């Protein structure tokens, strides 16, 4: 299989001595052409080009989006220069490809001596028909990938928010509606080029460096350019269920429920034996009739073969919640034990929220294949370090509000529902079986981050193996944020620069 390679003349910037003085290490001396610093008039707007600019209260989002500088990289030379500058001057680096991370972790928290590296300008795209490989730049957005592949009749499994950047998406999950039948987008990466903290760039494949390959996909932070193949252009029937708005609303924001089912028949056969309201079967009564009972007409039934690249283009959308702010918590489990009492608790919470002025909710339940051989998502276990291969149901709880005065109420609603239903998601015995993710916009929950991180992975050995890779490729923790694997012990790194 042919791999893409790039030969570039690389240069780096260096200082005399182990650590330069304040003047040499000031952000105005960053050796990259395009830099935004707090002294620039454009800095505030540039630092807020992230979803998290609407996270929580204004003061909360400002604190999470406060890099010492933003460095815009469009190629290898610039990337290596900022890595060298940060390494010698004691800065941490965080990387933004699209800025869609809900809690702002692709930026820098105030006071952390951190520079944000923006790779949104790396938008290369090429496709080789002989090898059936596409080479994609880390700065491409979901919609740009979709429409570059669309004329070729190809598709990459991804999420549906157009503004998501490919670099972060392929390293975090690339989870979407096609996961059960085709796995994750990251499962299809055949090689990638990566700039590491030692100032080198290497092409990584499953054979050339299997530990680093697995660690970057699912637990890593920075990818420059990745190479991927296509997915087969199978026909897929799909069903869209879209009840109308559920309650009177004010402003431009409505309460609604949208259920989208994309079914391939690849693993589990027909979606419904008789998808017909005139002769409903048990599945129809369980999954469809409740939506018909909410509002008429509630069902948009396409129920016909559609090429999957058309589906990807049709699903993806531009979502902009402005001028609303938000709080969100995400919860997942590998089992489905949400009984009637759980749904009663959720219904009561929704009723309470609907009664509140200018408070709007989006509760999203996403089903996946669970453990076993029932989905390609699970069958791809071991290809990379994505930890939730036994994922069966995932829940996002969003609460939107207009003013900072409502932030505490919104946060209380999200935390209250999460805490009151925890027993349904987490195994109280502590054995494997249930787990709860930690992604939340409540920064107070991050005080035990290191312990929480361990819950993302199937066992402690998996987590420690990722730490081993981190120790090897980034021993001074240059690439550091709340989404990177922490070092085992950073207190005795004698050769790492420090800065008061």
Image (cartoon, grey):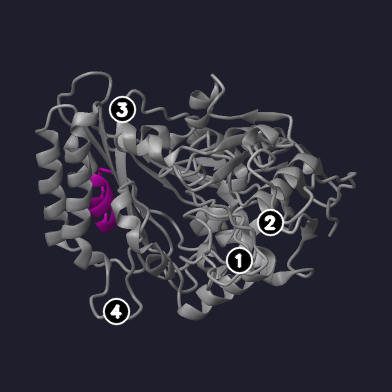
Question: Is tag 2's residue or tag 3's residue first in the polypeptide sequence?
Answer: 2
Range drawn in magenta: 277-289
- In the picture, measured across the screen, residue 364 lies left or right of residue 266, that is left
At x 10%, y 47%, the residue is 348
Secondary structure category for the residue under label 3 = loop
Examine the structure image and report whether residue 282 is included in the region drawn in magenta: yes
Q: 376 or 64: which is nearer to us?
A: 64
Question: Is tag 1's residue or tag 2's residue first in the polypeptide sequence?
Answer: 2
Quadrant of res 111: top left
From this view, report whether residue 397 is shown above or below residue 209. Answer: above
At x 62%, y 52%, the residue is 90
Question: Is tag 2's residue or tag 4's residue first in the polypeptide sequence?
Answer: 2
Q: What residue would you read off at disc 3?
A: 324
The span from disc 3 to disc 4 (Cα, nearest Å) is 38 Å
Q: What residue would you read off at disc 2?
A: 189
Q: What residue would you read off at disc 1?
A: 384
Secondary structure category for the residue under label 4 = loop
The span from disc 4 to disc 1 (Cα, nearest Å) is 25 Å
Q: Give the foreground label among 3 and 1.
A: 3
């Amino acid at each position: 299989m042919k791999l893409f390679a790039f030969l570039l003349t690389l240069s780096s910037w260096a200082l005399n001595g182990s650590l330069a003085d304040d003047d040499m290490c000031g952000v105005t001396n960053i050796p990259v052409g395009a830099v935004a610093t707090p002294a620039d008039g454009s800095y505030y707007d540039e630092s807020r080009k992230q979803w998290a600019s609407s996270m929580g209260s204004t003061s909360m989002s400002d604190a999470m989006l406060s890099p010492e500088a933003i460095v815009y990289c469009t190629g290898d030379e610039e990337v290596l220069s900022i890595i060298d500058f940060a390494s010698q001057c004691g800065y941490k680096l965080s990387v933004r490809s699209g800025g869609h991370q809900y809690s702002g972790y692709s930026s820098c928290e105030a006071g952390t001596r951190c520079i944000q590296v923006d790779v949104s300008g790396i938008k290369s795209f090429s496709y080789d028909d002989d090898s059936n490989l596409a080479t994609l730049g880390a700065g491409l957005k979901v919609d740009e990938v979709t429409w570059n592949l669309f004329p070729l009749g190809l598709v990459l499994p991804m999420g549906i928010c157009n503004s998501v950047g490919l670099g972060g998406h392929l390293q975090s999950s690339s989870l979407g509606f096609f996961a059960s039948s085709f796995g994750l987008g990251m499962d299809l990466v055949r090689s990638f080029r990566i700039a590491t903290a030692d100032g080198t760039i290497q092409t990584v494949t499953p054979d050339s460096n299997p530990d680093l390959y697995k660690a970057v996909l699912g637990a890593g932070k920075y990818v420059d350019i990745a190479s991927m193949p296509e997915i087969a252009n199978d026909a897929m029937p799909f069903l869209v269920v879209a009840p109308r708005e559920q309650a009177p609303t004010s402003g431009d924001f409505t309460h609604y429920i949208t259920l989208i089912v994309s079914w391939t028949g690849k693993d589990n056969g027909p979606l419904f034996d008789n998808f017909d309201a005139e002769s409903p079967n048990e599945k129809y009564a369980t999954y469809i009739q409740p939506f018909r009972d909410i509002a008429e007409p509630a069902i948009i039934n396409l129920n016909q073969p559609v090429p999957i690249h058309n589906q990807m283009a049709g699903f993806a959308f531009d979502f902009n919640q402005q001028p609303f702010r938000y709080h969100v918590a995400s919860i997942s489990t590998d089992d489905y034990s949400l009984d009637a009492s759980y749904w009663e608790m959720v219904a009561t919470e929704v009723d309470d929220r609907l009664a509140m002025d200018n408070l709007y909710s989006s509760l999203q339940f996403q089903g996946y294949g669970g453990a076993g051989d029932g989905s390609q998502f699970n069958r791809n276990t071991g290809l990379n370090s994505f930890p939730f291969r036994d994922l069966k149901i995932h829940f996002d709880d969003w609460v939107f509000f207009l003013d900072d005065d409502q932030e505490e109420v919104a946060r209380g609603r999200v935390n209250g529902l999460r805490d009151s239903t925890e027993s349904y998601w987490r195994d109280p015995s502590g054995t494997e079986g249930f787990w709860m993710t930690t992604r939340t916009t409540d920064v107070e929950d991050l005080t035990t981050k290191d312990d929480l991180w361990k819950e993302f992975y199937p066992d402690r050995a998996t987590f420690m193996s990722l730490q081993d890779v981190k120790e090897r490729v980034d021993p001074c923790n240059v690439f550091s944020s709340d989404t990177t694997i922490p070092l085992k012990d950073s207190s005795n790194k004698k050769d790492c620069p420090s800065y008061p």
